[in-house]
Image: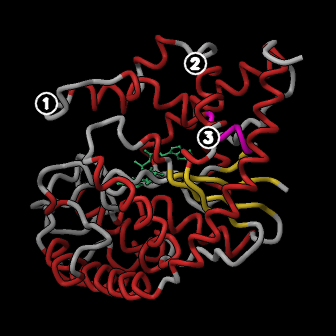
Amino acid sequence: MQTILTGIRCNDELTIGNYVGAILPLIEMSKKYSKEYSLALFVPDLHSFTTPVDHKLLYTNSMSNLRLFVAAGLPIGENNIEVYRQSRISAHSELCVILNNFSSYGVLTRMTEFKDKAERKDIDFVSAGLFDYPVLMAADIVLYGAKYVPVGDDQRQHLEFARDLAQRFNNKFGEIFTVPADIREQAKFASQDESIRIMSLTNPEKKMSKSVKDLNGTILLKDDPKVAAKKIMGATTDSVGVINFDKKNQPGITNLLVLLALLEGKSQEEINKEFVGQTSYGELKKRVAGAVEQILSKLQQAYEQVDVDELEKKLLHSEEKMRGIANETLLKVQKAVGLRE
Ligand code: TYM
């Protein structure tokens, strides 16, 4: 069975970008492919403090995110669907230490996310953890032989890095790792034309993100649904006066068209057919606001109803199972590099 796997950090609250970029695609795959693939959604908690966080809240946040995955529809009752916490499986850290020696310092310094975060004025301490982040992410992926890794557009470069690293390692030591599918194949598998990037509502040139000061541009999954709808109504658009699907010249409007298609589960073509050429930005906003309000209300209600005991049992079970798989891969690597007989 091939593996589909993705991770979502727990250092802050989740956004609608996380939801449509990673959670929803994985859940859709779990419905579509649960007989043919094994699926894993994990919390990369060791990745959480590569930028400063409130450590007192970290544990609660990871449990709360896991609960949200279930509320969003992840069918944890199924046998080949796993949920786990990265830090509970020590092979992630061990493999990362080994892979560091096969990762290029130069390439890591050129990673966009590293450069962006390292340059941010509100981050005054740039850690080695932030620099090494893609290597740990590569370890997360190759430990389980994941072929498909549904991630948003911002993680594409890290996925390419993992592919290169797996290939380089295999060239040197033989077929140890499964090389993840390339970006085009990933998008095709997820039935997407291209990978998803939801932009900030107030600054549509920038990715919607949880780690920003002005949260008017970001919809958090825990936002009051009415407040979230207001954020959509207040989204920055443009003065063209006609709706076009044009990321370059009308990024705000295009962002709303993208979001609407994903939230309503329709193709971009279908949504564009309905709206492109229309002149009322208000109508489009109202429709997106309605979809956001409905999805958040449903999600928040479901969140309250999640059986936390069942979730905790599932976590322990998955962690045990995944530890076994991860340790097998780690042993192969240890043998290949000469650490074991
Ligand atoms: P993280 O926690 O920043 O984001 C989790 C997922 O949400 C996607 N995402 C978005 N998609 C569309 N539009 C947005 N505005 C948006 N914001 C976030 C991200 O692309 C991601 O898919 N390094 C990863 C976590 C990770 C991981 C892994 C993922 C660690 N190990 C192994 C896959 C496999 C990260 O920081 O994602």
Q: Residue at x 65, y 31 (%)?
A: 163
Residue 191 x, y percent position in the rendering: 62, 63
Crowdedness of circle 1 by 10 Å Cα count: few (<14), some, many (20+)?
few
Q: Does 311 sit left or right of 262 as displayed?
A: right
Q: Secondary structure at mark 1?
A: loop
Q: Residue at x 79, y 35 (%)?
A: 329
Crowdedness of circle 2 by 10 Å Cα count: few (<14), some, many (20+)?
some
In depth, the one of 155 and 67 nearer the eye is 67
Q: Can you tell me whether the CB of the residue at mark 2 lies under 8 Å from the nearest atom of ligand 1?
A: no
In depth, the one of 165 and 262 nearer the eye is 165
Q: Can you tell me whether the CB of the residue at mark 3 lies under 8 Å from the nearest atom of ligand 1?
A: yes
Specify the segment rendered in magenta.
139-144
Q: Main secondary structure of the magenta part?
A: helix
Q: Quadrant of the N terminus?
A: bottom right
State yes or no: discs 1 and 3 in contact (Cβ < 8 Å): no
Q: Secondary structure at mark 2?
A: helix
On screen, 329 above or below 204?
Answer: above
Amino acid on which the number 2 mark rests in the picture: Asn
Q: Does 178 sit left or right of 121 as displayed?
A: right
Residue that label 1 marks: 121
Residue 114 x, y percent position in the rendering: 36, 28
Crowdedness of circle 3 by 10 Å Cα count: few (<14), some, many (20+)?
many
Amino acid on which the number 1 mark rests in the picture: Lys
Residue that label 2 marks: 100
Amino acid on which the number 3 mark rests in the picture: Asp
Q: How far is the residue under mark 3 from the one under mark 2?
A: 13 Å
Q: Secondary structure at mark 3?
A: helix
Q: How far is the residue under mark 1 from the one under mark 3?
A: 30 Å
Residue 233 x, y percent position in the rendering: 15, 76
Q: Of marks 3 and 2, which one's residue comes earlier in the chain?
A: 2
Residue that label 3 marks: 140
